[in-house]
Amino acid sequence: MNGVVAGVEKQAAVKKGRHRKFKLKTMLSLYTLFAPTAILLFIFHYIPIYGIIIAFKKYSVYKGIMGSEWVGLAEFKYFLTDEKFWNVFRNTLILNVYDILFGFTAPIVFALLANELYSRVFKRVMQTVSYLPHFLSWIVVSGVFYSFLSPETGLFNQLIEWLGYQPVYFMTETSLFRGILVFADIWKGVGWSAILYFAVIAGIDSSLYEAAWIDGASRWRQAIHITIPHMAPMITLLFLLRLSSIFSVGFDRVFLLQNPLVYKVSDVISTYIYRIGLEQSQYSLSTAIGLTQSILGFVLLITANRISKKLSGMGLY
């Protein structure tokens, strides 16, 4: 009896070994394809992490990272008690709230409206045209906005003057700057950001719409009860990713559109780090701020993911 059991176990072990070899052989090509990406990721994304230790040192370019003096949390205490930092922190949060309220919802609304178009040709043309601004650099976009909003030759101010009003200095008006910044981001990226929503909508079974139409559901009710529920997982995923960067704002658009007259409302953490890091050579301070920004974003992402999984069962992992 013992011999029979031993024979069965031996056969199972042999079968398991063959299965492992077959699996390894099958996956080897995939591992080979992934290897260059993993190596580049390790070299350019993980090795540079070593440099964050200068946040805990009084870094000197002459002494190097290891030769510089340790100062512990002195740089962190400095910027946490600095009034300028809290101003840029507040500006960053306000801009991100605007981005979430308007910039995040704009692609969703755009995809829903585009889905209601009956002409397929017009829909494709409209989608293609909406992608184009994404491929323009922020240098070009900032130039376009400065030209259109110029108080002397700008199209909008010419229209305002034609209506009998005084020209408006849009780019130097603090009450308008945040709106212009958010609008510029929406104009540039709404089409591109809606691609994922278009893909989700295209994958919805058309028989659901047909059944709803037979039951007398209007297009609005079809969108509410069919389209949006199918988009919900993607919306949740993108929203969680968006939350992870709530303590940072794209450097390019703010830096290229701002000017000294609107620093009070336009200066954000990324532009503040640029000024103190590169212009004033305070590398340790800028690294400490950047590290804090990353940690806060990571904690927020983990917390939001857990809350989302508890409330809706959906999350990043």
Image (tube, helix red, strand yellow):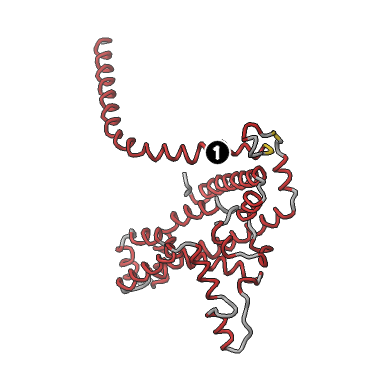
Tell me where residue 3 appears, x and y as whole percent.
25, 10
- The residue positioned 46% from the left and 65% from the top of the image is 190
- The residue positioned 63% from the left and 49% from the top of the image is 277
Q: 292 or 112: which is nearer to us? A: 292
Q: 159 or 150: which is nearer to us? A: 150
Q: Residue furthest front?
A: 62
Res 291 quadrant in image: top right
Res 272 quadrant in image: bottom right
Tell me where residue 7 appears, x and y as whole percent.
24, 14
Q: 265 or 64: which is nearer to us? A: 64
As drawn, is 120 to the left or to the right of 91?
left
Q: 173 or 60: which is nearer to us? A: 60
Label 1: element kind: helix
Location of residue 270 with respect to 149 vertically, above or below: above
Query: Which residue position is annotated with label 1?
Result: 49
Give the amino acid type for the residue marked by disc 1 in the picture. Answer: Ile
